[in-house]
Amino acid sequence: MTDKFHTTVTLEALASWGSFHGAYIHPSLGLVSESGSSTAIAQAHIPQSTKILSIPHSLAITYSKAAASFPPELLHSVPPVSHYAILAAFLAFEHLKGTESFWYPYIASLPPVAAGCGGPLFQSAEEVEHWLGGTNLSSQTVQEIKEDWRQDWRSIRDALYMIPEWDSKAVELTWEIYLWAASMFSSRAFPDSLLSIGSASLDPTAPENSVRVNADGTLQGMRTTEEGSSKSALFPVLDILNHRPRTRITWKAEHSEIGFLCGDDLAVGSEVFNNYGPKPNQQLLLSYGFAIEGNPDDTVMLKFKPALSEAQQNIRSQQIPASEDTGIYHIHAHSCEPPQELVQLFRLLVANGWELEQLEKYPTAAVSVTNRNEISAKLQILNALLQKGRLLTELAPKDPEANDTQDQKYARVFRQGQINIILTATKKLSAEIKHLCKESKMYSVSTFEEFYPDFYNGMESCFGDEEQREASGMEEVALILGMCYLFLQMQDGKLPKELDTQIRALVGRYPMDVEGGEEDVERMQGLFEDIFPAAAEVAPEVFGSEKWTPELLGWGARVMEEGIITNGSLAVFVSMLPCLVKWLEREYSHWRNNCKRS
């Protein structure tokens, strides 16, 4: 036994109780405590695929046992009581029985009522706001979750009040004991479908009547009955193992027994882990009371549920089923990329008229209809991530790390994981946007310097340099003229190959003789008269052609408004993207260093 782990009277009693009632604990497996938390260690080498723990079905706390302990009236009460409330109330009443409960040795090994599963559910609103402010687990969010549980508690308590001889028990079912019991199910429960594992495994190397937990936490070989019919269950002794991502185990079911085999060799003195599945730190912290540093299954959750027009909604319904369109999206630590469903949503939100028509034709296309649309969509997502990262750093607690309690340490790990994912995601998005802008070859007038120096110099002669144009409000006009110049170059067959495909696509998308184009012409008539013939006198080689007309300016203005993502100010923003990401990185590093030095 290492100094890190030690046995306790409570755990010895749990092992004796389990063994007496048919549980199997491998002789080389020790049930131990570490910093007040129960776990198990290998006291000798245990080979791969060895059975390490099992219990008979009689030890499991299931819904059928819980329901059988209550009067039938409760199960048919109006409004109905949820199965989760029945399970939690059953455990609460068993706790109140003390030593008279069949499960007393198991219940005694669980965390005390005041501590529950730990984490934000058992902290004050002030503590939650201080340690988790700016995250998705704000005090308001935690209170909303607790209120859902409180509603379940009220429903079963009020139903019991109405049943003769159960009113006194209803008084004993306090919110505190119910909250503890509910948290035990949220942090320790397994699906009761594991008690009925199918005889065939999808993994040919797994034993019969077994289900393998893959490295990513998914299950193989589990037989499901009616969809959604699985309920929570507590498996005493089996639930003592802590979670470690990517741990390989194999569940094994006999006629009246459930247990598991280790998926890898267990070295002497090593902690033995279970695999709860691919759970992000937000879920682990809320439901289990802990978070894992460097969690490979971590995510940043984003919420977007914008109001859509009828046309947008029709397209959206073809991209994602309405039942799945929850407005919740996850950026995963392993990729740090926005999910396709989120990108599709923003492509839809920023689409202009022509792009919307294309999305109606190809709603589920894997790529965007235009670079303009893709840049706009990803800029919006990048901005949302930068704002989220800013909140996470600005509202981070400034307390020194050395003084952290266990709950505070986990809160800090959760926040750091969120910021790390956001930093990586913003860097990737920033690079992608810059690449798209470079590929588009037209996000500022200075782009013309590379391909058409005569036009660039003519613009400077007529309207000044970029700074002067910005100050005088002529930068937008310069971009319109630039688009028109490219149109004329296309007509003369003088487009460089780097721009040819893009400009021809724009001309095909925005024909000159479009219905309603006369409005653009009228709008540009005054601008045309202000520019010509003065510009032709200053730069005749650029503006001297009779092809420059109000119609051409009207077309250029329409293309710039609808078909081109960027202008001078956006070019500045795109150039600032690395600075914005570095600012977030610097703020995060500053916070970390201050907490360590304090």
Image (cartoon, rainbow, N blue to C red):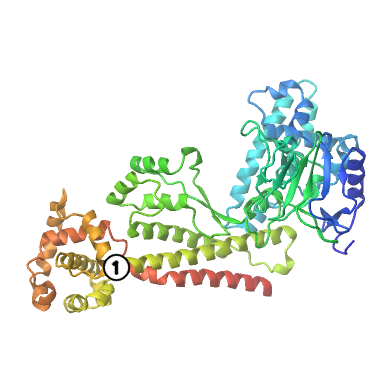
Q: Using the image as rendered, state which of residue 510 and residue 579 is in the foreground.
A: 510
Q: Is residue 232 above or below residue 343?
A: above
Q: Is residue 300 above or below residue 3?
A: above
Q: Position of residue 397 (x, y in %)?
A: 63, 64
Residue 587 in percent (x, y) is at 55, 70
- Residue at position x 64%, y 23% from top? 78
> With respect to residue 334, does 313 lie above or below?
above
178 above or below 349?
above
In the rendered image, residue 310, in percent from the top left (x then y), is placed at: 35, 40
Residue 598 visible: no
Residue 80 visible within the image: yes
Which is more toward the observer, 575 or 168?
Answer: 575
Residue at the spot 9% in from the left edge and 74% down from the top edge: 536
Give the residue pinned by disc 1. 442
Q: Residue at x 71, y 51 (%)?
A: 275
Quarter of the view holding residue 553: bottom left
Of residues 290 and 473, the one nearer the viewer is 290
Work out which residue is located at the far front of the displayed protein and give it.
Answer: 204
